[in-house]
Each structure stands twice: as C-alpha cells, then as structure tokens.
C-alpha cells in the first residue's frame, strides 16, 4: 500500500493549490542556481529528455494557483534543486487550462495544482507528485520514489497520444470557469456501465473525475491493488479524496458519526501508517470547517507533540489559525515557540509575520515589535506586500 498518510496531509494542509501566469513553454526561470525550465516547445523538450537520457517533468499549473508561485519561489529557486535537475531531469512548465495543457490535464487527470508529472526518457508517465514541497523533501521524493523503478507505475495508453477518445461530458468538465459543464450522475453511470475495460485510461479518468458514482466506489475499493498497479499513488490518493469529502460533509452538517465513519475508512486503507497522526489530520480539517477553534487548538497541540516529520508550512498553518481564531494566551505562546524553531530554519517573511503576531497575542510586545519589523524588512527585500504587518506593528506600539 502506498503512503495514504502523506497524501492525506498534503490534501488537508496544502489543499486547493494554485500558480504563475505563463504560456506553455514560454516561461524560463532566470538562472539563480535554481531550476532552469526548458523554454522551447513541448516536442523539443521530449526530444531533449530522450537524447540526454533524463526524466521529463511537467510542472502542471494554472494562472490562478497560489502554491505554484510558492513552489517557484522557495523550491525551484533553490540551488540544490537546480543541481539535481541539471543532472537528472528536464523541466517544462505547462498551463493546464490552455492549449495542449487541457489535453494533458484530461489524459493524466490533473485536478489539483501544482501537480508534477514525471515521464521516463522513453515517454511513459512513471510518477506524479501533488502539492507544494519544500526543497529537501522534494529532492528526497525525487531520489527515493520518482526515480526508483520499484516505486514507479505502469500507465495504460500510448503516452504519445494526447487526444484520447474521452466522452464529450468528460471534456466539457475541463473547460475553464463559466464554460465548465458537469454531467449528471446518471450520465456518468450509463457510460461506465457500457465499458468493457474498467482499468483503461478512459474509464479511470471518468471514475476519478466524477468521484466514483454509485456502485463504482465499491468496485474501486474492492479492486484497489489492481488500480494501484496501474496508477500508483494516484489510486491511493482517491481514497484520501473520498475520506476528505466525507470529513467536509460531516463538518458542514456537524455530524460526528459521519466523521467517525470517514476516520474508520481512512484507517482501513492506511497500511502501516501512523493511525493517530492520520486521525488528528482529519480531525483538524473537521474542526477548521466546523469552526470549532477550541478543539482545533487542542488537536494542534496533540499534533505538534507527536514525533513525526512536519513541514514548516504545516506548522505555520497551525500557528496562524491559532493566532486568528483561538483566544488563549497560553496556547498563543506555545504556538510562538513552534514558530521560533521554524524561523531559525527558514526566516521567510510569512513565517516571521506569524511569529510576530503570536508574540503580540501572547503579550510579549517588545519582542513582537522586533520581529514584526524584521518581517517587514525581509518582506520588502523579497518584494512582498507588507501592509498587514505594518498595521500589526502599529498596534503593538500602541499598547
């Protein structure tokens, strides 16, 4: 079983991802030691990867995606990541809502951003990574999973053929904005009932796009090993989507029984993962959607006390929600201690701002003013909008 927990955490804490405006193949990150994206055509990128016997990565983004921008700024700009790509991978950007990108999104079921599609030098898709990753974890995933033949998966269908014979309702669902049209469940079921091969890229695309309607949810769960063989982590990730959808519905209805049902489903397919961490991850998603901030703060403390890897972005998310919503000075002070370790490792504008805000909330005004000013200085240097931090500094000095 692939790592459901890793996918769950990504889905919960880095959900609804988003990125830089660029036409496919037209963006080239200026060489600062980071990743240099290929600025020729898609066909030329494919030829380059084959000639140099390298993997080919598509950075699948949209022009409204926020976390794609963060990936560009924090991860792809990192020298160590650039060096790794220079040696092993040809990188190419493609907007999933324009031109060839729409066909690519349909064929490879790109539904969240950023998504990174990895192809072998010979053409087939061998791995996909969803969501923002910081430099060190990104390189580790590339080394241990993306480039590991034992972790790679098969993909049915000819990788050279993008215009697959998908049903019209599937194609319409990939239109942008107001032009997007979604089919009825009956239309989807009727189509799937007529398919001889439920493991084909067409059947899989339809099932995943429309959340496994009717009997096809149980069909997928009953045949998960077969789908994992073809689609790897993408198949496991569909369970996370099912669970997350149930958690969100439970929170909306404030239905703890439905939440428990979702947690049981997650545990059943978690393999050897840490069940307590998974429970907390989904529980915090429930708390946040239900706006039960007292429970959220308590569960965040539990999460931080666990001896498991947590990214700086995750920690910042917990801490910022505590600053915004939890009226408990002791917890604010504890959250500030979490952020103190984060800024020692990564003194970015966003993290310094969160730290200063928590210091203010916990009553450490002198220290809060110092780090608010530091956040402003770093933010201005990096071209960030710092007006909210400047307003915070005024409030601190007014006390």
Image (tube, rainbow, N blue to C red):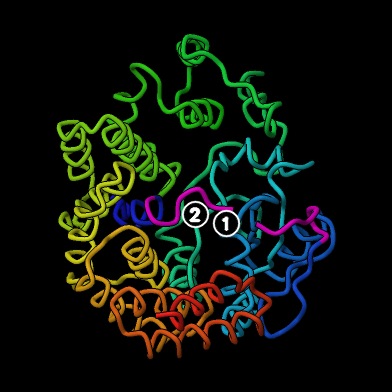
Closer to us: 333 or 94: 333
- Rendered location of residue 323, percent (x, y): 35, 66
Marks 1 and 2 in Cβ contact (< 8 Å): yes
Residue 344, relative to residue 242: is it above or below? Answer: below
Q: Find residue 321 and report its image quarter.
A: bottom left
- From the viewer's perspective, is 108 left or right of 141? right
Task: Return the x and y of residue 42 as percentages of the image width and height.
Answer: 79, 54
**Residue 248, quarter of picture:** top left
Residue 91's x, y, as percent?
68, 65
Q: Main secondary structure of the magenta part?
A: loop
For the point 70% across and 37% down, the residue is: 103
Query: Alpha carbon of mark 1 to alpha carbon of mark 2: how far?
Result: 6 Å
For the point 58% across and 67% down, which residue is it?
A: 71
- List the residue tagged with mark 2: 130
Q: In the image, which disc is placed on residue 343?
A: none
- Residue position marked by numbered label 1 in the rendering: 116
Q: What element does badge 1 sit on?
A: strand
> Which span of residues is magenta-colored?
12-26
Residue 15 in the figure: left or right of residue 119: left
């Amino acid at each position: 079983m692939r790592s459901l927990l890793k996918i769950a955490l990504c889905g919960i804490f880095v959900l609804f991802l988003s990125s830089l405006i660029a036409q496919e193949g037209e963006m080239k990150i200026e060489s600062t030691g980071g990743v240099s994206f290929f600025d020729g055509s898609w066909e030329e990128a494919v030829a380059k990867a084959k000639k140099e016997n390298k993997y080919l990565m598509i950075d699948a983004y949209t022009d409204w995606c926020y976390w794609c921008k963060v990936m560009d700024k924090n991860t792809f700009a990192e020298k160590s990541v650039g060096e790794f790509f220079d040696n092993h991978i040809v990188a190419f950007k493609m907007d999933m809502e324009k031109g060839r990108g729409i066909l690519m999104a349909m064929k490879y079921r790109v539904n969240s951003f950023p998504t990174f599609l990895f192809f072998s030098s010979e053409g087939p898709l061998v791995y996909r990574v969803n969501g923002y990753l910081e430099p060190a974890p990104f390189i580790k995933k590339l080394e241990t999973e993306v480039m590991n033949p034992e972790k790679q998966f098969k993909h049915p269908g000819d990788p050279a053929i993008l215009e697959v014979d998908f049903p019209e309702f599937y194609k319409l669902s990939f239109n942008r904005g107001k032009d997007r049209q979604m089919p009825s469940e009956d239309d989807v079921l009727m189509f799937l009932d007529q398919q001889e091969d439920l493991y084909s890229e067409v059947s899989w695309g339809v099932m995943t796009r429309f959340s496994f309607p009717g009997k096809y949810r149980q069909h997928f769960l009953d045949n998960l090993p077969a789908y994992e063989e073809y689609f790897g982590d993408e198949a496991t990730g569909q369970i996370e989507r099912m669970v997350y959808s149930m958690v969100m519905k439970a929170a909306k209805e404030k239905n703890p029984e439905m939440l428990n049902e979702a947690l049981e489903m997650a545990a059943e397919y978690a393999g050897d993962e840490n069940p307590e961490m998974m429970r907390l991850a989904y529980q915090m998603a429930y708390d946040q959607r239900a706006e039960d901030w007292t429970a959220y703060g308590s569960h965040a403390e539990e999460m931080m006390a666990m001896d498991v890897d947590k990214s700086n972005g995750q920690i910042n998310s917990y801490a910022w929600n505590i600053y915004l919503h939890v009226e408990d000075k002791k917890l604010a002070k504890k959250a500030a201690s979490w952020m103190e370790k984060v800024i020692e490792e990564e003194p970015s504008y966003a993290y310094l701002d969160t730290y200063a805000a928590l210091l203010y909330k916990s009553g450490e005004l002198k220290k809060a003013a110092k780090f608010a000013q530091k956040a402003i200085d770093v933010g201005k240097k990096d071209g960030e909008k710092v007006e909210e931090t400047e307003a915070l500094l005024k409030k601190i000095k007014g006390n």
